[in-house]
């Protein structure tokens, strides 16, 4: 059955019994499905304009869930406000024109594959200048918002499809860099990301990370020719990971900080769909990963979205009204993780929710912008995520024989960390109060580390050394973790 998109030349061919969601994904047109197509979140809805579907009944306006709807005839759909940028065909960032390079320059590309966002940076390898940057939503989001949804899809035989999505998206990014900067050849691609994303980038089945003992196929760095993956680069380096859920993004971030040469106990935290963290003290590195869930990246939040244009990234109370800041300074269309933190802080300060997270007027909710609300269910998701982060921090400190007050520097990385309001992060209990004056918001250190791999001699060796020195704490096996988790659900 053919699926036509309203006002677009894109046509998909759905296989027998295949949902609209998966058929569109195979054709490269990506619909977000934070719940992984489990028919729970309703965020993959499309409007049926022509034809018939089974599996879901169109509402009065023709909207159906793409994950449930199966074409019974040729159909035409409208995807609402989905933009080219959301489908990985256009950048959300670009470097200033004065940083563009001479045609004779040697170039490389740093690539950070996040579960939610794929970011890339074009680098002049002779001068180390960043020439151009692209950040788009990960095309694999049709298979779910979090890492375990992708692993679950792989366990169902979808590894090749997941690989095709990220491979095709990577090639589009490379071609876009080439086209708009006049590049003939890209010499080197350095790739960072969590362990599951790196497996899928290389078309390696990550299914072993979906069950005990959570076994990845590889952790060491990989070096190969671009032609092996049909990518238009000469050479590819994939940075080394530490464990199944502590990936090359953490290795890259620690190396980019030169963490081993920072005096005093230091804590590195990368907040995404997982909360990955490393505590460094006297030459020892203790790591853990906590299942924060996708709330901090906007998924499984009623009006949530990734950190792209139109996402509310900041919320403030101005005495008697609320004001918001959006990414790209465009009208708000949803709320991302940092905006959610600010919204929860406002709700606490105004007594809309109490210390338990209870919202007295749950039917009314809280609306930082027209049509964009934070519900009681969203607060619950936030509490689960923030408790996971704070509990991980406390367990790491306990295993290192330290108190949170002993940590001298705290480095917060990731797209979420780039926009975060430090005071509100403490107010809402993501971090303990003593961290406030010690927090450094570092942005995307995974991408920065991949970029340094292109230009810094022996950076890969430093990553390898860091990975070898890490010991990993299994939070689930710690007898005090559940007590910490329950206590840290509260807003103190």
Image (cartoon, helix red, strand yellow):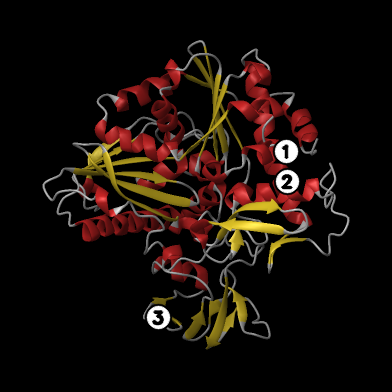
Q: Considering only vertical position in the picture, is 231 above or below 60?
A: above
Which of the two residues, 288 or 122, is positioned nearer the viewer here? 122
On screen, residue 431 versus residue 8, left or right, reads right
Residue 180 image offset from top left, x and y in percent: 24, 60
Q: Tell me, for residue 7, which label it has, or none.
A: none
Q: Are marks 3 and 1 in contact (CB under 8 Å)?
A: no
Q: Tell me, for residue 427, which label it has, or none.
A: 1
Q: Residue 259's image quarter?
A: top left
On screen, residue 234 versus residue 303, left or right, reads left
The residue labelled by disc 2 is 345
Q: Residue 332's image quarter?
A: bottom right
**Which mark is first along the chain, 2 or 1?**
2
Q: Considering only vertical position in the picture, is 323 above or below 199?
A: below
Q: Considering only vertical position in the picture, is 479 above or below 150?
A: above
Residue drawn at x 18%, y 36% is 126
**Crowding at label 1, few (<14), some or many (≥20) Cα neighbours within 10 Å?**
many
**Crowding at label 2, few (<14), some or many (≥20) Cα neighbours within 10 Å?**
many
Instruction: Spot the residue most to the bottom.
Output: 50
**Which mark is first along the chain, 3 or 2?**
3
Residue 145 showing in the rendered view: yes
Residue drawn at x 61%, y 42% is 421
């Amino acid at each position: 059955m053919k699926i036509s998109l309203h006002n677009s030349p894109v046509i998909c061919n759905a296989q027998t019994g295949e949902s609209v969601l998966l058929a569109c994904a195979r054709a490269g047109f990506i619909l977000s499905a934070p719940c992984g197509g489990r028919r729970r979140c309703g965020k993959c809805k499309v409007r049926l304009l022509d034809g018939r579907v089974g599996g879901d009944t169109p509402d009065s306006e023709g909207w159906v869930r793409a994950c449930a709807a199966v074409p019974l005839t040729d159909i035409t759909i409208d995807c609402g406000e989905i933009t080219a940028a959301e489908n990985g065909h256009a950048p959300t960032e670009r470097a200033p024109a004065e940083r563009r390079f001479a045609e004779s320059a040697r170039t490389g590309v740093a690539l950070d594959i996040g579960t939610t966002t794929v970011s890339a940076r074009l680098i002049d390898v002779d001068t180390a200048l960043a020439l151009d940057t692209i950040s788009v939503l990960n095309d694999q989001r049709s298979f779910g918002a979090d890492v375990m949804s992708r692993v679950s899809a792989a366990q169902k035989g979808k590894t090749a499809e997941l690989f095709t999505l990220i491979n095709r998206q990577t090639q589009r990014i490379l071609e876009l860099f080439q086209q708009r900067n006049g590049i003939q050849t890209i010499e080197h691609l350095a790739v960072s990301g969590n362990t599951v994303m790196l497996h899928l980038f290389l078309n390696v089945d990550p299914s072993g990370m979906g069950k005990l003992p959570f076994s990845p196929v590889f952790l060491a760095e990989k070096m190969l020719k671009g032609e092996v993956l049909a990518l238009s680069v000469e050479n590819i380096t994939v940075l080394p990971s530490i464990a199944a859920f502590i990936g090359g993004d953490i290795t890259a971030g620690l190396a980019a900080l030169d963490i081993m040469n920072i005096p005093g106990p230091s804590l590195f935290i990368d907040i995404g769909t997982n909360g990955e963290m490393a505590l460094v003290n006297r030459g020892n590195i203790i790591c853990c990963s906590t299942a924060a869930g996708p709330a901090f990246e906007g998924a499984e939040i009623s009006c949530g979205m990734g950190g792209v244009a139109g996402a509310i990234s900041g919320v403030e109370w101005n005495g008697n009204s609320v004001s918001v800041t959006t990414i790209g300074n465009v009208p708000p269309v949803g709320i991302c993780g940092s905006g959610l933190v600010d919204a929860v802080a406002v709700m606490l300060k105004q007594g809309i929710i109490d210390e338990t997270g209870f919202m007295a007027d749950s039917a009314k909710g809280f609306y930082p912008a027209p049509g964009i609300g934070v519900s009681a269910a969203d607060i619950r998701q936030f509490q689960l995520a923030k408790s996971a982060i704070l509990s991980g921090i406390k367990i790491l400190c306990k295993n290192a024989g330290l108190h949170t007050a002993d940590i001298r520097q705290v480095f917060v990385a990731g797209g979420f960390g780039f926009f975060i309001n430090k005071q509100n992060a403490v107010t809402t209990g993501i971090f303990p109060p003593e961290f406030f004056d010690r927090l450094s918001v570092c942005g995307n250190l995974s991408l920065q580390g991949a970029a340094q791999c292109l230009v810094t001699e022996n950076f890969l060796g430093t990553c390898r050394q860091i990975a070898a020195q890490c010991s990993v704490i299994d939070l689930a096996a710690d007898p005090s973790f559940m007590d910490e988790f329950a206590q840290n659900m509260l807003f103190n």
